Image (spheres, grey):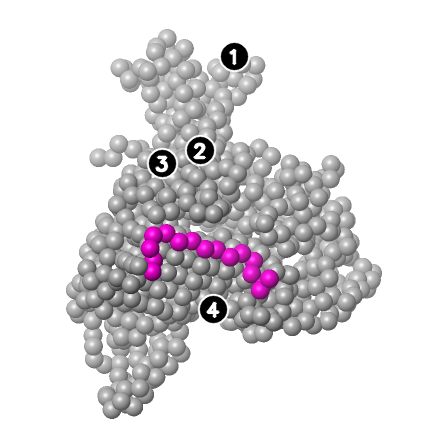
């Protein structure tokens, strides 16, 4: 029987009714007095000099209240990463990608704003452009941001004796891979409502993952102190990494400042695709050495990643791809070389996995290939190199808990992997196959914001006993509010229905880092737990006076404090809070708590340092059917086992895994931002296909719970690792079905059919029999 009241329970979302009923307020629901509607004029060219801009006709249009160009901005360069500040709010003298912001209009309604955009005349002088990062590095390639060879940031790392290990390996594999550019496809497009304030600052209602961190960037861009920017984060309709710093928010602020009224800007889906922050595409060259018994001798990787026309987060994403997977297994000899490279394409940023997902595809594909060539079981080869609890990786990552071997064993068991491999059909046009892939991830990342790591909360007990929790993290739709409610209710001994988790308002919330690096449950959860622990201490002190008892003789449950020796003697939180308020001059019963993990920002030169308080592992099995007459691939079964530490809410964990699998199947088989000469050819959800209900099979979930010493009640994260292994598992299943390995994403029906026909032609040329 569980010792917990709320932790580990399958509870529905505490805000589910609000969302389902339509009462939840998103940014697009916000209406302010005098609010205007903004629209942005975007570049139609991938690379061009701006010769002139004439806004006079737009300014003369009735209903237009402001038109802005670069001249109306503070004119400073800025960016999310201080070392690579290549943003301006509006283009100054040239554009670097189709969709870059050139001018903007605020009008009484959106229709008028759109008409005004058509009246702005911009004369461009087109410049040579380059779209592939490999080509962009070559001598003579057009310079986009004035960087040598267009390289934004190089990365290099080496541990052990890679050359010696490769020379002594029994098997060496080497291959080129490509992971393509995909769109996050959240339900709510990027948006913002910005109101200018009398003191020269701004109040912003934004769907943003990093409300506090973004103020540092926005303050510099707007020429104000970060404290002059108040960000309120309402309900969000998804983000998946894309909604960090967004230029749209700053354009709205420039318009609001110019006209002295609130301005609302909401991207259309077309705008969101052509000018968002999609996944970083990567060219990956991987070389690995293996011993006959399955031990991994060495790993060497070279990555060239497309940055796009300005820098969002591709440099750290590229670096992450270079070395995060090195703690998926007990590697001893590794070498990595990477480059983030400017291209005249849409700027690239974070998307669930942050580079780890890109690298997991080639790594897990090559491990599967090695297992086949060495005659080893795919589970056994991974178990041979699995990370145990207490392991310290070659990069200094301290694994306080690991359920990796259990996830491998469990996913093999629940999927019936061995029997499915034996039963796979080998005749007829439809071939069936199964594939395995594993993954790892962090639960926080000190490297992302080195100044500090951790989380905090303020917990207020109202006079009616209700509990309000203020934090600085971000629920973007993943269920963090529910997890925080369960953690606080459990730690405080409150009824779940008495706990309210406030949305983030930087004017009153603690300074939190937000949602990234799967840190919410682990680090954010520890922050709210510490606040709840402190609030419980206040309640026990007040109850000790009330009962005339020692504080150690008391405990809490169901929003009451009781005597352990006589549980019938109780007093409610509300009674104690009222007494506290009335005897402290109206001061509310408020407690604060904070959590500072024992993490270390990696040394800039050696890259050594424990970046996360906890590390997660997982293993997936996919089953596919491949129609050899059409090339169509259907995923017919899916099983996932994840090491999550203590499961706070198994129902929500299942939802996270199911969503991650759906996104991974889309990336593996169909999703692709098709770019031609810098222009995205499929900028709508009619042409950019995401998986539907018929594309995703039932996903069977399993959770391994090694209690982690650094998580709330032992919990770890789940968000990003739910997607990381999916493309590799699907690719390995396709190989098992038809004997062809694919090294580029997505693996479309056209590619499968072409590969089958090419093999058939080669076999006929050698005098062998065709496959189909």
Element marked by disc 2: loop
Say if mark 3 contacts mark 1, CB within 8 Å. Answer: no
Is residue 483 or residue 466 the one in the foreground?
A: 483
First in sequence: mark 2 or mark 3?
2
Query: Which residue, as the protein is rendered here, is positioned at the far top?
Result: 548
First in sequence: mark 4 or mark 3?
4
Q: Which residue is mark 3?
A: 710
The picture places residue 765, in percent across and down from the top left corner, at 29, 90
568 in relation to 11, above or below: above
Q: Which residue is mark 1?
A: 583
Q: Nearer the viewer, mark 2 or mark 4?
A: 2
274 in relation to 247, above or below: below
Specify start and end residues of the magenta stretch as a single range.
148-163
First in sequence: mark 1 or mark 4?
1
Q: Which residue is mark 4?
A: 672
Question: For the residue carrying disc 1, how many other residues have a C-alpha within 10 Å: few (<14), some (14-19), or many (20+)?
Answer: few
Query: Marks 2/3: CA distance?
Result: 10 Å
First in sequence: mark 2 or mark 1?
1
Is residue 627 or residue 144 the one in the foreground?
A: 144
Q: Residue at x 45, y 21 (%)?
A: 574
Q: Residue at x 62, y 46 (%)?
A: 217
First in sequence: mark 2 or mark 4?
2
The picture places residue 31, in percent across and down from the top left corner, at 65, 47
**Does the magenta segment cover residue 157?**
yes
Query: Marks 4/3: CA distance?
Result: 38 Å
């Amino acid at each position: 029987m569980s010792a917990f009241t709320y932790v580990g329970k399958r509870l529905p979302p505490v805000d589910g009714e609000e969302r389902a009923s339509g009462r939840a307020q998103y940014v697009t629901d916000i209406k302010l007095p005098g609010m205007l509607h903004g629209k942005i004029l975007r570049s139609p060219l991938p690379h061009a000099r701006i010769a002139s801009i004439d806004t006079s006709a737009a300014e003369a249009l009735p209903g237009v209240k402001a038109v802005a160009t670069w001249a109306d901005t503070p004119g400073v360069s800025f960016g999310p990463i201080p070392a690579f500040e290549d943003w301006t709010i509006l283009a100054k003298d040239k554009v670097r990608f189709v969709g870059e912001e050139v001018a903007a209009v605020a009008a009484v309604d959106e229709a008028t704003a759109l008409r005004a955009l058509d009246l702005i005349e911009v004369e461009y002088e087109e410049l040579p452009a380059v779209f592939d990062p490999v080509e962009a590095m070559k001598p003579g390639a057009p310079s986009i941001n004035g960087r040598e060879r267009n390289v934004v940031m190089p990365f290099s790392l080496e541990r052990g004796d890679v050359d010696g290990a490769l020379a002594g390996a029994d098997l060496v594999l080497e291959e080129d891979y490509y992971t393509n550019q995909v769109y996050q496809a959240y339900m709510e497009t990027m948006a913002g409502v910005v109101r200018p304030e009398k003191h020269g600052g701004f109040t912003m209602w934004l769907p943003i993952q990093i409300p506090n961190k973004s103020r540092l960037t926005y303050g510099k861009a707007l020429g104000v102190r970060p404290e002059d920017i108040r960000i309120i984060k309402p309900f969000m309709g998804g983000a998946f990494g894309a909604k960090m710093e967004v230029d749209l928010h700053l354009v709205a602020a420039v318009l609001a400042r110019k006209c002295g009224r609130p301005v609302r800007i909401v991207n259309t889906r077309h705008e969101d695709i052509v000018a968002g922050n999609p996944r970083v595409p990567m060219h990956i060259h991987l070389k690995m050495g293996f011993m006959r018994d399955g031990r991994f001798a060495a790993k060497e990787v070279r990555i060239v990643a497309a940055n796009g026309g300005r820098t969002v987060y591709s440099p750290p994403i590229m670096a992450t791809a270079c070395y995060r997977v090195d703690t998926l297994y007990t590697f001893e000899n590794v070498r990595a070389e990477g480059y983030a490279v400017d291209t005249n394409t849409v700027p690239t940023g974070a998307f669930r996995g942050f580079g780890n997902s890109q690298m997991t595809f080639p790594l897990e594909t090559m491990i599967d290939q090695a297992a086949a060539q060495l005659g080893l079981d795919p589970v056994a080869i991974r178990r041979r190199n699995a990370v145990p609890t207490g392991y310290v990786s070659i990069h200094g990552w301290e694994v306080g808990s690991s359920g990796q071997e259990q996830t491998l064993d469990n996913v093999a068991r629940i999927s019936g992997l061995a029997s499915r491999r034996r039963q796979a059909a080998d005749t007829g046009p439809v071939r069936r196959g199964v594939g395995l892939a594993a993954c790892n991830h962090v639960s926080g990342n000190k490297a992302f914001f080195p100044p500090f790591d951790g989380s905090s909360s303020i917990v207020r007990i109202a006079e009616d006993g209700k509990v309000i929790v203020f934090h600085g993290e971000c629920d973007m739709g993943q269920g963090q509010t529910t997890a925080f409610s369960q953690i606080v209710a459990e730690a405080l001994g409150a009824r779940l229905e008495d706990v309210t988790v406030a949305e983030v308002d930087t004017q009153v919330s603690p300074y939190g880092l937000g949602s990234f690096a799967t840190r919410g449950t682990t680090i954010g959860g520890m922050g709210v737990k510490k606040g709840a622990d402190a609030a419980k201490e206040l309640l026990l002190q007040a109850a000790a006076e009330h009962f005339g008892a020692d504080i150690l003789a008391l405990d809490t449950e169901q929003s009451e404090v009781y005597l352990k020796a006589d549980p019938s003697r109780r007093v409610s939180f509300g009674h104690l809070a009222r007494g506290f308020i009335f005897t402290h001059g109206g001061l509310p019963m408020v407690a604060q708590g904070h959590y500072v993990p024992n993490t270390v920002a990696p040394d800039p030169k050696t890259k050594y340092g424990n970046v996360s308080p906890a590390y997660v592992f997982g293993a997936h099995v996919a089953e596919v059917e491949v129609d050899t007459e059409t090339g169509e691939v259907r995923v017919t079964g899916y099983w996932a086992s994840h090491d999550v530490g203590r499961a706070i809410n198994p129902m929500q964990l299942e939802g996270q895994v199911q969503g991650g699998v759906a996104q991974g199947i889309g990336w593996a088989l169909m999703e692709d931002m098709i770019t031609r000469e810098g222009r995205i050819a499929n900028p709508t959800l009619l042409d950019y296909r995401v998986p539907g209900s018929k594309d995703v099979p039932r996903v069977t979930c399993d959770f391994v719970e090694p209690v982690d010493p650094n998580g709330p009640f032992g919990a770890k994260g789940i968000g990003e690792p739910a997607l990381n292994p999916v493309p590799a598992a699907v690719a390995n299943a396709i190989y098992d079905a038809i004997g062809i390995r694919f090294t580029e994403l997505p693996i479309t029906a056209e590619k499968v059919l072409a590969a089958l026909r090419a093999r058939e032609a080669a076999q006929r040329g050698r005098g062998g029999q065709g496959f189909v």
